[in-house]
Amino acid sequence: MRALVLELFLALFLALPGAALAQASEIAKPDPAVEERLKGLAEELRCLVCQNQTIADSNAPLALDLRNQIRQQIAAGRDDAQIRAYMVDRYGDFVLYRPPFKASTALLWLGPLLLIAIGLAVFLLVVRRRKATPPVAAPLDATERAHLEALLEGKPVPTPGEVKPSKRGKR
């Protein structure tokens, strides 16, 4: 008897942590009209855990909770604008995939354009500097000239002591 009680206690002790990690599940028999509104709203809201998925696409526990909150608010009779406003009040403009243009989100909207403009300005400056200063070749001394002429004519390359003045003259 004592062993049976100990086994039951041990089983209960091992099952409790699993219950603590359990999450609420989606409803078993969803209403099609509610689910259609939920899908439309969930496509506009960002998962705060994943940050690159909508709450409709995310499997994160928080996304599941947010979808259930939206269902509850739809059941309470709130319209889409009220539900969006509730989510923004609770989680900030970050929860919206298309946040409104205002002072706090101006950098978010104008940042990419600003980076493109800076990149274009740097590109134009580099191109202008390259055109403004053409490369100037340094004149060759007698050794380098003899070496080059030997290479071009296919002759053996002279050593520095064998260099003679060129037949063509200096250029």
Image (tube, rainbow, N blue to C red):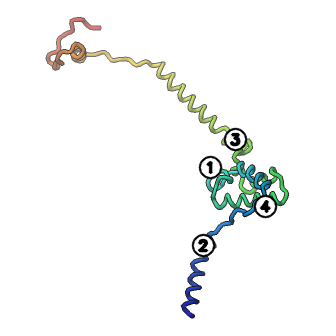
> What residue type is disc 2 on?
Gly
Q: How many other residues sit within 10 Å of disc 4, few (<14), some (14-19) or many (≥20)?
A: few
The residue labelled by disc 1 is 52
> What residue type is disc 1 on?
Asn
Residue 35 placement (x, y as % from top left): 76, 55
Q: Is mark 3 on a helix, strand or loop?
A: helix
What whole-number distance in Å separates the C-alpha atoms at marks 3 and 1? 20 Å
Q: Residue at x 54, y 91 (%)?
A: 3
Residue 51 placement (x, y as % from top left): 63, 51
Please tell me which of labels 3 and 1 falls first in the chain: 1
Q: How many other residues sit within 10 Å of disc 1, few (<14), some (14-19) or many (≥20)?
A: few
Quadrant, the N terminus: bottom right
Check if mark 4's residue and mark 1's residue have beta carbons within 8 Å.
Answer: no
User: Is 21 or 154 nearer to us in this picture?
Assistant: 21
Residue 137 placement (x, y as % from top left): 35, 17
Check if mark 2's residue and mark 4's residue have beta carbons within 8 Å.
Answer: no
The residue labelled by disc 4 is 72
What whole-number distance in Å separates the C-alpha atoms at marks 4 and 1? 25 Å
